[in-house]
Image: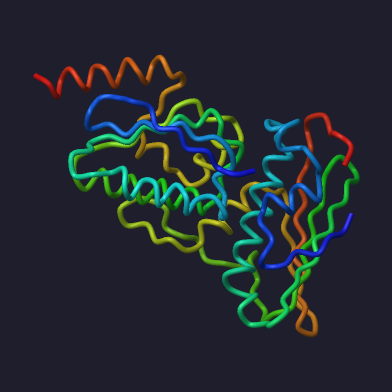
Amino acid sequence: MKITIRPSDTTASILERLWPGSVSKDPDSEWFIKCCTIIDEIHANLRDHVAPLFPDFACSLSVAVSGGGITLQFQYPGPRFDPTNQPDINIRPIENRGVGGLGLLIVSQLCDRMDYAHDKGLNTLTLYLKVTGEFRKI
Amino acid sequence: MSLIINESNGPAGIVALELHGALDSDNSPLLEKYLSSAITSSVYMVAFNMAGVTFVSSAGLRVIFKTVKEMKSRGGQVSVTRLRPGVRKVFDIVKVLPDLTVFASQAEMDEYLEAIQRREQN
């Protein structure tokens, strides 16, 4: 399944397009909660940092299920920014913690593999999650 | 998937909130705004019942962090109860749990709040 995400979209509306009714039907499914969190993190980052560079910004999000896992692929225009190659952030103690970098830390810990490519101004971020529980049909 | 915030009528000095929905980038500003008016100078504890929180992202965590910093700066504390597994996983990733008082159940939290209230009154 492939959808187009725009900066004005809410995370809830994106999730509803991908998995209608899932939030109320399946709130504790591990893979689903991970996907919700990852999509919100990436969407918020793009909305805040990349979309302002383009008057009509749009990101495509593909979701595919195969081989006991789920793949989320984000493709969007913009300068190179490799989220797989970011410095570790200092997360302790809380009093000294900055506000940046938490989202990428969470995404990198929730997925099992994260690949990034940049070609001719197009970023491709691919995230793979293993699914250990029962997989509801998407 | 909006965020619903219900404040319990608790002891003075304690802001006890039940959260329902996603603590994501769209909804977190609502919680931040609510807390900025709820946390008055007399508040020494903020208690979040997270049983209804479906997922939390960094935007929600920033509000929690801000609250923890604010309460620590005045010698207060922040507690959370009934974290769902997916929410707890994110709290674990960012290592925030040591800064929080964590309760498994609402009854456990209520008992703790009552003990604090008795201590404050004495």
Scheme of image coloration = rainbow
Residue drawn 88% across the image and 51% down it: A64
Where does the C terminus of chain A fall, quadrant-wise?
top right
Asked if residue A17 is positioned above or below residue B44 in the image, the reply reads below
Tag count: 0
Say which quarter of the image contains residue B42: top left
Residue A68 at x, y percent in the picture: 86, 40
Q: Is residue B48 in view from this perspective?
A: yes
**Residue A82, horizontal then vertical, whole percent:** 65, 71
| Nearer to us in this view, A73 or A61 | A61
Image position, residue A122 (x, y; %): 77, 78
Q: Would you identify the image quadrant in which residue A133 lies?
A: top right
Residue A93: tell me if it is visible: no
Instruction: Give the side of residue A127 with respect to residue A52, left or right.
Output: right
Q: In which quarter of the image is the N terminus of chain A?
A: bottom right
What residue is at 78 percent from the left and 33 percent from the top? A132
Q: Nearer the viewer, residue B17 or B102?
A: B17
Q: In this view, does A101 lie to the left or right of A56?
A: left
Residue, far bottom:
A120
Point out residue A95 in the picture as x, y percentages from the top left corner: 30, 53
Direction left: furthest residue: B122
Using residue A92 as the reference point, say whether residue B4 is left or right of it: right
Q: Looking at the image, which residue is at 36% across and 36% down?
A: B100
Q: Which residue is drawn at 48% across and 47% down?
A: B94
